[in-house]
Image (tube, rainbow, N blue to C red):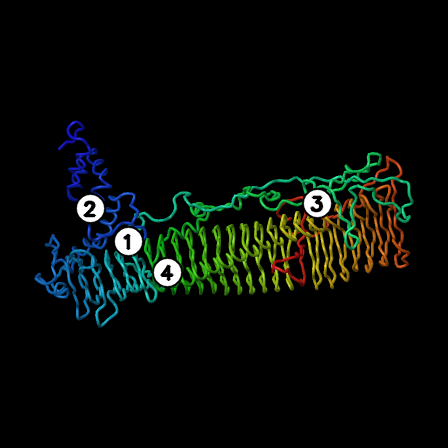
């Protein structure tokens, strides 16, 4: 037969071939290449019709996507046909063996019919007359066996008609090497709940229903189950080397639907190799290219260069440097206004960086200008080598490449160990199944091994439990609406949980306890009624590259000695904290994007001791990081940006180690050997009842003061900080507070350099270029001012108000404007002692003043090096220091109103 273009059109050929049965289609495809391509073109017509008309299988995407057509109906038919013949792969071995030499002459399989009016009236009688690989056909009706059925030779038991028309009430014990059961409804016999069990052979179930009973397979036995429904039926797999459950539905279980117990048997039966080959040849769910539709945060970074600053100082040598003040500000000038407690606030336009323009552009033209060169430490780059500028409404922000989420395919390519784990098959493989409306999904225990791919778990008490040194591999499953946790691991459970969609569960999406240590990779965990992931009870785990969002409680909750590694995740839009570490929880939390959460981005309380390193914590509706109730840990190298509350809020009894962070543009107070800049209120607000150290920070351009010490009954030590360009004073010390300032550079603030009511010691600081007085000593203050260099841009170098007690010794004080004196003393105060001070008045235009011997403070090169500075190669050396603070007080809306920095 030939097919020529001019004889019949292709459409007519397709119509003719659509009437051919399967064997004839196969013969036609062997005629020639043109015929072969013509047969292939019948995929959506004849091949689809053949597949759906085959009673031994269901829709290829049943039960999860029955409305989605396969890529090829012919290929789906081929895969099912090959799988249905797998149970006969050992036929040649059996028929040529010595013990079965009696059957060598038989070339064809018999078909034994069972039912009213047929050859046999019961399954037991048919089995008694069956031989190797015979086919037993059960006709419609209810077939009940009063005794246990024992299969001693390989047979195939098939129901005739549509699924549901043939019901079998029996307890079957397989003692042969292989068997197949198809198109049957199994129900347990009256004397046993076990419908089928095998201990060494291979069993294959196709297109069956199981109701209200148990299936048991014991290693080295194996099983292959496809297109079956289990209603309140428990599948128990003990020490199985390999079992496959594919395209099955588990409904209404009163206990676990599938239990995998025991380490896979080292002894394998004949079917193990064939099953493994069948699994590897069939299409799986492992990604082959970057097809993940991961949501990502688009952040646009802006680099800002911070170069050495030049401070212009206006001087004129006409008055005695120590005479009483007689001048007053010019009317209408932009001179500093005096606020409450004598604090001065300069009313000058904002510059681009939130600081001052100290070059004297608003001075009178006839005044002399002196430039004193010194370097002010500006905000240091922390994340991705860039400094984030002010957030712009509606603007997108580009994330640094180190914080962009990878697809699952990319992660597996990078992590060869994870790839090997994802590709391995051992124990039980459950693929494309539906578990719904019951108690439990899959329970893996006692060194069991199970792999789950492309399944749906919904409306269960829990989806998967893994305990007692068992290992699970979960790839691309959907787990939702569980009444407890979605995935539960304890007692050293582990494995790989990757690419799953876990959502809308009543408890945690993933619950890790008691030394369990899974790898959780590239999942979406969202809209949970509680936390996304919980790690507690010495649980561990690697949690990497996940999206965790819109959960009612913390995205990740670590407590009771939980100690996971949490890296490169995006945790956002949660109704509580992004990450909460409580009750002695630990963990390494690094390179995560934590954004837009209702509570703190990271919340550390009640003995939590995490390490937070190189995270981006931004756009939160409350604080960036909250540390309280004996919270501890290390905060290093994080960018805490544009949160509506504080950058970092430390409450009572907290003892964190905070270093080398970049904290900026937060709504209230910010913490930044940290960079604290552009926050809405004070950069640092201290209310502490313990000794506090504030060392080697850059506190810049905050909306209020640089540092406010509101309560400090123990000594607060402020050393080697750069405090510049803040909208009010550089530092304010309230009454009854004890503060020591040493080695700081306090520059270009719009109020006073330091204003104090408390007990202060000011030693070896540079207080230069501030719009108010360099030092403002208010009544009730007791201050020692020793070996400082002080200059006020527009006001007094040192101003002593009322009965302030002061010792001024060996200071160098530069004069500012011509109508201001260097030193101001309001009353004749005998408790103000001045010794060996040097007051400098500019006399000639050629005179030169420089901050030299020593150079401008702070001197960071003399500080101890912190771990981040030692490894980053940055020119600015950060000091790893510790905050020891009991913080009292709160905020009327239960949000933070202050923040402590270091």
Tell which residue pokes out farthest to the bottom in this image.
191
Which circle's residue, 2 or 4, is located before the other in the chain?
2
Circle 3 sits on which residue?
Answer: 377
Describe the element under mark 4 as helix, strand or loop.
strand
Circle 2 sits on which residue?
Answer: 50
Circle 1 sits on which residue?
Answer: 275
Which circle's residue, 3 or 2, is located before the other in the chain?
2
Q: Position of residue 658 (x, y in %)?
A: 64, 55
Mark 1, mark 4: which one is toward the viewer?
4
Which circle's residue, 1 or 2, is located before the other in the chain?
2
Describe the element under mark 2 as helix, strand or loop.
helix
Is residue 639 visible in the rendered image? The answer is no
Per the model, the C-alpha gap separating discs 1 and 2 is 26 Å
Q: Quadrant of residue 90?
A: bottom left
Q: Position of residue 732 (x, y in %)?
A: 75, 54
Per the model, the C-alpha gap separating discs 1 and 3 is 67 Å
Circle 4 sits on which residue?
Answer: 459
Which circle's residue, 1 or 3, is located before the other in the chain?
1
- Circle 3 Cα neighbour tier, 10 Å, few/some/many (<14 / 14–19 / ≥20): many
């Amino acid at each position: 037969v030939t097919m020529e273009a001019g004889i019949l059109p292709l459409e007519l050929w397709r119509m003719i071939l659509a009437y051919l049965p399967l064997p004839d289609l196969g013969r036609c495809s062997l005629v020639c290449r043109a015929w072969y391509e013509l047969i292939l073109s019948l995929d959506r017509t004849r091949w689809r019709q053949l597949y759906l008309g085959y009673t031994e299988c269901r829709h290829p995407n049943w039960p999860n996507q029955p409305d989605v057509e396969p890529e090829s109906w012919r290929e789906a038919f081929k895969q099912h046909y090959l799988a249905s013949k797998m149970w006969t792969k050992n036929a040649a071995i059996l028929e040529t063996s010595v013990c079965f030499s009696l059957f060598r002459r038989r070339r064809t399989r018999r078909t034994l019919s069972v039912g009213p009016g047929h050859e046999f009236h019961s399954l037991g009688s048919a089995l008694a007359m069956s031989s190797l690989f015979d086919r037993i056909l059960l006709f419609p009706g209810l077939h009940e066996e009063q005794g246990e059925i024992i299969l001693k030779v390989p047979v195939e038991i098939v129901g005739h008609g549509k699924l549901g028309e043939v019901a079998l009430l029996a307890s079957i014990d397989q003692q042969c090497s292989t068997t197949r059961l198809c198109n049957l409804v199994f129900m347990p016999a009256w004397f046993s709940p076990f419908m089928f069990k095998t201990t060494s052979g291979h069993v294959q179930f196709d297109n069956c229903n199981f109701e209200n009973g148990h299936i048991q397979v014991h290693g080295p036995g194996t099983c292959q189950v496809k297109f079956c429904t289990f209603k309140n039926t428990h599948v128990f797999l003990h020490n199985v080397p390999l079992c496959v459950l594919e395209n099955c539905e588990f409904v209404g279980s009163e206990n676990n639907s599938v239990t995998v117990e025991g380490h896979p048997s080292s002894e394998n039966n004949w079917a193990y190799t064939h099953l493994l080959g069948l699994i590897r040849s069939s299409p799986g769910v492992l990604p082959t290219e970057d097809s993940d539709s991961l949501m990502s945060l688009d952040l646009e970074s802006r680099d800002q260069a911070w170069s050495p600053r030049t401070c212009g100082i206006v001087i004129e040598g006409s008055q005695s440097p120590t005479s009483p003040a007689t001048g007053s500000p010019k009317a209408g000038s932009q001179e500093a206004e005096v606020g409450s407690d004598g604090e001065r606030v300069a009313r000058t336009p904002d510059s681009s960086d939130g600081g001052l323009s100290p070059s004297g552009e608003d001075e009178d033209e006839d005044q002399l200008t002196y430039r004193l060169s010194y370097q002010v430490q500006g905000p240091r780059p922390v994340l991705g080598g860039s400094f984030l500028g002010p957030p712009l409404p509606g603007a997108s922000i580009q994330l640094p490449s180190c914080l962009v989420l990878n697809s699952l395919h990319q992660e597996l390519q990078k992590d060869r160990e994870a790839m090997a784990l994802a590709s391995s098959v051992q124990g039980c493989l459950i693929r494309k199944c539906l578990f719904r409306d019951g108690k439990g999904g899959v329970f893996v225990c006692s060194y069991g091994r199970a792999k789950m791919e492309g399944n749906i778990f919904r409306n269960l008490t829990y989806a998967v439990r893994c305990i007692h040194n068992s290992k699970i591999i979960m790839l691309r499953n959907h787990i939702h609406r569980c009444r407890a946790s979605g995935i539960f691991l304890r007692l050293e459970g582990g494995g790989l949980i990757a690419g799953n969609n876990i959502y809308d569960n009543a408890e945690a999406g993933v619950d890790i306890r008691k030394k369990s240590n899974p790898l959780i990779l590239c999942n979406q965990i969202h809209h949970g009624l509680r936390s996304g992931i919980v790690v507690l009870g010495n649980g561990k785990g690697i949690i990497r590259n996940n999206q965790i969002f819109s959960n009612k409680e913390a995205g990740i909750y670590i407590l009771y000695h939980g100690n996971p590694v949490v890296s490169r995740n995006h945790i956002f839009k949660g109704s509580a904290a992004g990450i909460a570490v409580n009750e002695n929880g630990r963990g390494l939390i690094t390179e995560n994007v934590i954004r837009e959460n209702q509570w703190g981005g990271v919340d550390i309380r009640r003995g939590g001791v995490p390490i937070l390193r190189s995270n981006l914590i931004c756009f939160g509706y409350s604080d960036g990081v909250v540390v309280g109730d004996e919270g501890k840990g290390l905060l290093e190298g994080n960018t805490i940006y544009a949160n509506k509350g504080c950058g970092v809020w430390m409450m009572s009894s907290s003892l964190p180690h905070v270093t080398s962070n970049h904290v900026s543009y937060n709504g209230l107070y910010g913490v930044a050997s940290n960079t604290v800049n552009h926050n809405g209120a004070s950069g640092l607000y201290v209310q502490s009842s313990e000794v506090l150290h504030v060392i080697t920070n850059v506190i810049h351009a905050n909306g209020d003061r640089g540092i406010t010490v509101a309560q400090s009954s123990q000594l607060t030590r402020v050393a080697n900080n750069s405090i510049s360009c803040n909208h009010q004073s550089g530092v304010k010390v309230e009454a009854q507070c004890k503060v020591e300032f040493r080695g700081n550079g306090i520059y270009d603030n719009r109020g006073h350099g330091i204003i104090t009511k408390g007990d202060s010691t000011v030693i070896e600081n540079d207080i230069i270029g501030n719009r108010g007085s360099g030092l403002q000593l208010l009544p009730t203050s007791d201050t020692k001012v020793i070996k400082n260099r002080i200059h006020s841009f527009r006001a007094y170098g040192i101003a002593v108000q009322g009965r302030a007690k002061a010792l001024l010794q060996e200071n160098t004080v530069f004069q500012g404007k011509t109508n201001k004196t260097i030193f101001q003393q309001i009353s004749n105060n005998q408790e103000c002692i001045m010794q060996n001070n040097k007051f400098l008045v500019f006399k000639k235009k050629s005179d030169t003043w420089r901050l030299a011997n020593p150079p401008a403070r702070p001197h960071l090169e003399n500080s101890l090096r912190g771990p981040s500075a030692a490894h980053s190669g940055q020119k600015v050396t950060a000091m790893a220091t510790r905050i020891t603070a009991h913080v009292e007080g709160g905020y009327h809306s239960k949000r933070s109103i202050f923040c402590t920095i270091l």
